[in-house]
Image (tube, grey):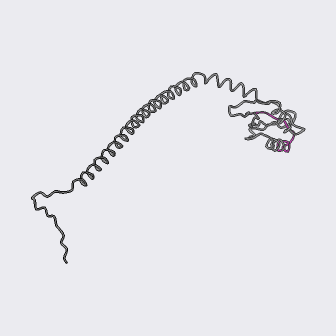
Amino acid sequence: MIERTRLSLNLASHPLRNRRFFYLILSSLVVALLLISFFAGKIFVEYKAKAQETRASVKRTDKLIKDAQRDEEDFSAKIEDAIIKYKGKVDLINSIILGKSFSWIEFLSDLENSLPDSSYIVSMAPTLAKDSRVQLSFKVAYSSVDDLLELYNNLKALKFNQIRIISEAENERGLLISEISLNYEKNI
């Protein structure tokens, strides 16, 4: 026996379709679009507020930098004015301190220790230089050239430098007299 199945044919010009599936898809898309729009709007508002805060912070920082630069220029000008105004006083005080800090006893002791036994200083003219040294010009009397060489070597061994023998002469007692110029480094 042959079974017969019934076919339901809709021969209408606009056949009926199952619209529930399409409404479900459409409503899901609308809900997804609304959720995406909501979160996108929320993110946009948050980042817009943060961008405004950042712009305000950058403006405050720029203002602080400009104020600091202006203050630096003001202080630099004040420092330059103070340098010009007090330069003479500072130089005077520094020269006094430099003169007071120099050990004349050590200097004269070193000079005396450099002299051979038969020699003596006739005259001397020390001058304090600004670069922490003493320039000295002195005349020394000695009996022979060997004494002069010994004096020269002794001066070199101590703190004396730039030693120059300027002139030589003989006095009425037969002693040789030489004028010597040198520098002495100070201990401060």
Q: Nearer the viewer, residue 81 or 154?
A: 81
Q: What's the magenta region? A: 136-149
Q: Position of residue 57 (x, y in %)?
A: 44, 33
- Seen as rendered, the residue at the extreme right is 117
Q: Position of residue 56 (x, y in %)?
A: 41, 32
Quadrant where the N terminus lies? bottom left
The residue shown at (68%, 26%) is 94
The residue shown at (80%, 41%) is 158
Q: Quadrant of residue 128?
A: top right
58 vs 182, left or right, is: left
Q: Is residue 34 magenta?
A: no
The residue shown at (61%, 24%) is 87
Q: Is residue 137 magenta?
A: yes
Q: Position of residue 12 (x, y in %)?
A: 10, 59
Q: Nearer the viewer, residue 38 or 163?
A: 38
Q: Quadrant of residue 66?
A: top left
- Seen as rendered, the residue at the extreme front is 1
144 vs 1, left or right, is: right
Q: Nearer the viewer, residue 153 or 35?
A: 35
